Image (cartoon, helix red, strand yellow):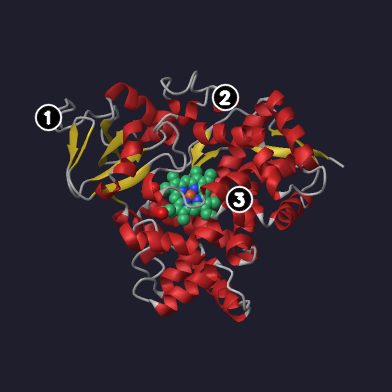
C-alpha cells in the first residue's frame, strides 16, 4: 500500500512489514505518538500486527472532545467488556442523558470528598500495609501501590478491602483489557482456565459486596454507590440490569487501580530522582501530619505534593490514548474521519509540546506555579481525558496519590531498589515503571 498522503489518506507512521510499528509502540507508546504527531501532523495512520488505525492528536482534538462530543463514541470498545459480565452497556460507552444519569449515580462515591471525609480510615489502610513490610527488603513498587490503591478504593466504593479476591480482580481486569481494549492478546485468552477462574471470582466478589450492603444498609440515605446501583437496577432494569450493576460495583477497581497505582509508582521514582523536591515534599508531609492525620482543609495547602502529582500525570500519562468511533463525518487536521470509522485520540500528545511546556521532557514542578501555569493553556493538559467522559474519579485520584505518598514520606525513609535503577516503561497493559522497586530503610517516629 502507498505511504504517500492523498486527499483523504493521512500519512503513515514508519514501521516494519507486517509487524508495523509494534516495537516502537511497546517500547514507549506515548513517545511514539508524540514524535509522529510532530513529524506527520495532527492525523496519521499507524500499523501494528496487521491492523491499521488513525490517530488524532494535538490540543485541538482535546478541545473537540468537549465542543463536538456528539461526534465521538466509545460504545464498540467497551461493549465486549461489559458483555463479559452479562451486561449490555456501561458508563464509558453511553452518551447524552443516559450517560449523565449514570455519572450522577456514581459521582459522590468517586469524588474528592469521598476520600477527604475519610482520611483517618485511609491513612490507617496505608500504614497497615507499610508496617507489613520488612526494613531493607525489596518491594516491587507498582504491585505495592496496587495493593494500597485496591484497599482504599475498596473501602470507599465497596465498604471493604478486596482481601483474598485482590489477585483475581487484577487478573480478570488485566486480561479483559489486554483482549478488548489494548488488543495485546487474542480473544482465546478469555477461554483459558486462568481467566475463567478470575472472572468467576470477580463476579462472586461483586455479588458479595452488593448483598452485604443490602443486608446492612443504614436507614439514612448516604448517596452510596452500592445503594444507588441496587435502587436503580430494581426500579429501572432497562436502564441498569443486575449484571450491569454488579459490573459497576467493581468500577473503582477497573478505572482506578492501574491508573492510580502506576502514577503513584512513577511519582515515587521522580521524587527519588530529585532529592531537593523530595525534601520539600517531606517537609510538607510532616507539616500536614503534625496534629495527627491531615485535616480536610490541609489538602488545599499541599502545594508541593499537588504539583509533583500534576507533573507526574503529565510526563507519565497512563491513559494517554483513547479509542473512539466517529458517529458522524468529522473534519480534523485537514482530513475527514468518516462516520463509523474507528480511531485513537492521543490526548496526551500536547504534554510533550515545547509550545506549551518549556523543556518538556524535564521533570519540572515550577511549570505549574505562577506565573508560568503552562498546563492552563487550552488543550495542553489532559491526563484525565476531556469532554463529557472526563475521568469521574480525577479529584479522588489526585488526593489519593498525594495522601499515599505523603503518608510514606511522613512515616518512612525509602530508597530505590536497585539503587542504580534506570527507568524502563512497560505496558501490562497500562504503562508501568518496569523493574522499579523500593525498600524501606527506616521508620520515622
Ligand atoms: C491517575 C489516575 C487516573 C487516570 C489517569 C484516569 C484517567 C481517565 C481517563 C483518561 C478517562 C477518560 C476515558 C475516555 O474518555 O475514554 C477516565 C474515565 C473514567 N475514570 Fe478515571 N483515571 C484515573 C483514576 C480514576 C479513579 C480513581 C476512578 C474512580 C474510583 C476513576 C473513574 C473513572 C470513571 C468512572 C471513568 C468513566 C467516565 C465516563 O465515561 O463518563 N478514574 N479516567
User: In the rendered image, which quarter contains the N terminus?
Assistant: top left
The C terminus lies in quadrant:
top right
Tell me what residue is drawn at x 62 percent, y 79 percent: 219
Name the N-terminal-most of marks 1 and 3. 1
Local SS, label 1: loop
Label 3 Cα crowd, 10 Å radius (few <14 / some 14-19 / many 20+): many
Q: Residue lying farthest left?
A: 7
Q: Nearer the viewer, mark 1 or mark 3?
A: 1
Q: Nearer the viewer, mark 2 or mark 1?
A: 2
Q: Estimate the x, y position of residue 111 in percent, counting from the top left.
A: 55, 54
Front-most of 423 and 85? 85
Residue 7 marker: 1
Any mark on residue 370, and which?
2
Mark 1 CB lies closer than 8 A to ligand 1? no
Which residue is identified by label 3?
A: 146
Q: Is residue 170 visible?
A: no
Amino acid at each position: 500500500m502507498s505511504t504517500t498522503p492523498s486527499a483523504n489518506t493521512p500519512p503513515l507512521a514508519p514501521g516494519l512489514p507486517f509487524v508495523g510499528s509494534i516495537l516502537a509502540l511497546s517500547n514507549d507508546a506515548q513517545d511514539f505518538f508524540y514524535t509522529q504527531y510532530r513529524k506527520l501532523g495532527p492525523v496519521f495512520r499507524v500499523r501494528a500486527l496487521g491492523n491499521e488505525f488513525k490517530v488524532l492528536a494535538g490540543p485541538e482534538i482535546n478541545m473537540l472532545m468537549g465542543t463536538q462530543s456528539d461526534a465521538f463514541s466509545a460504545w464498540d470498545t467497551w461493549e465486549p467488556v461489559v458483555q463479559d459480565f452479562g451486561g449490555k452497556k456501561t458508563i464509558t460507552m453511553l452518551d447524552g442523558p443516559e450517560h449523565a444519569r449514570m455519572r450522577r449515580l456514581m459521582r459522590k462515591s468517586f469524588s474528592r470528598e469521598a476520600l477527604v471525609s475519610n482520611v483517618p480510615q485511609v491513612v490507617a489502610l496505608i500504614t497497615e500495609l507499610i508496617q507489613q513490610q520488612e526494613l531493607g527488603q525489596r518491594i516491587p513498587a507498582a504491585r505495592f501501590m496496587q495493593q494500597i490503591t485496591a484497599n482504599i478504593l475498596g473501602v470507599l466504593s465497596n465498604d471493604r478491602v478486596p482481601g483474598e479476591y485482590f489477585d483475581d480482580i487484577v487478573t480478570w481486569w488485566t486480561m479483559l483489557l489486554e483482549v478488548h481494549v489494548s488488543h495485546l492478546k487474542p480473544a482465546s485468552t478469555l477461554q483459558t482456565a486462568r481467566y475463567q477462574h478470575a472472572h468467576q471470582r470477580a463476579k462472586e466478589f461483586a455479588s458479595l459486596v452488593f448483598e452485604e450492603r443490602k443486608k446492612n444498609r443504614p436507614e439514612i440515605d448516604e448517596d452510596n454507590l452500592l445503594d444507588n446501583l441496587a435502587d436503580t437496577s430494581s426500579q429501572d432494569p432497562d436502564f441498569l440490569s443486575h449484571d450491569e450493576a454488579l459490573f459497576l460495583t467493581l468500577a473503582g477497581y477497573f478505572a482506578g487501580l492501574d491508573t492510580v497505582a502506576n502514577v503513584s509508582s512513577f511519582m515515587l521514582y521522580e521524587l527519588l530522582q530529585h532529592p531537593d523536591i523530595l525534601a520539600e515534599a517531606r517537609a510538607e508531609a510532616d507539616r500536614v501530619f503534625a496534629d495527627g492525620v491531615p485535616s480536610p482543609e490541609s489538602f488545599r495547602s499541599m502545594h508541593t505534593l499537588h504539583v509533583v502529582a500534576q507533573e507526574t500525570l503529565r510526563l507519565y500519562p497512563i491513559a494517554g490514548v483513547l479509542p473512539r468511533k466517529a458517529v458522524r463525518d468529522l473534519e480534523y487536521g485537514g482530513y475527514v474521519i468518516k462516520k463509523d470509522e474507528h480511531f485513537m485520540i492521543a490526548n496526551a500528545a500536547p504534554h510533550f509540546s515545547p509550545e506549551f511546556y518549556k523543556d518538556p521532557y524535564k521533570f519540572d514542578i515550577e511549570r505549574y506555579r505562577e506565573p508560568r501555569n503552562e498546563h492552563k493553556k487550552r488543550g495542553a493538559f489532559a491526563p484525565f481525558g476531556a469532554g463529557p467522559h472526563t475521568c469521574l474519579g480525577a479529584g479522588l485520584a489526585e488526593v489519593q496519590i498525594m495522601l499515599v505518598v505523603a503518608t510514606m514520606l511522613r512515616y518512612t525513609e525509602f530508597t530505590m531498589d536497585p539503587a542504580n535503577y534506570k527507568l524502563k516503561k512497560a505496558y501490562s497493559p497500562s504503562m508501568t515503571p518496569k523493574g522499579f522497586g523500593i525498600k524501606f530503610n527506616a521508620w520515622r517516629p
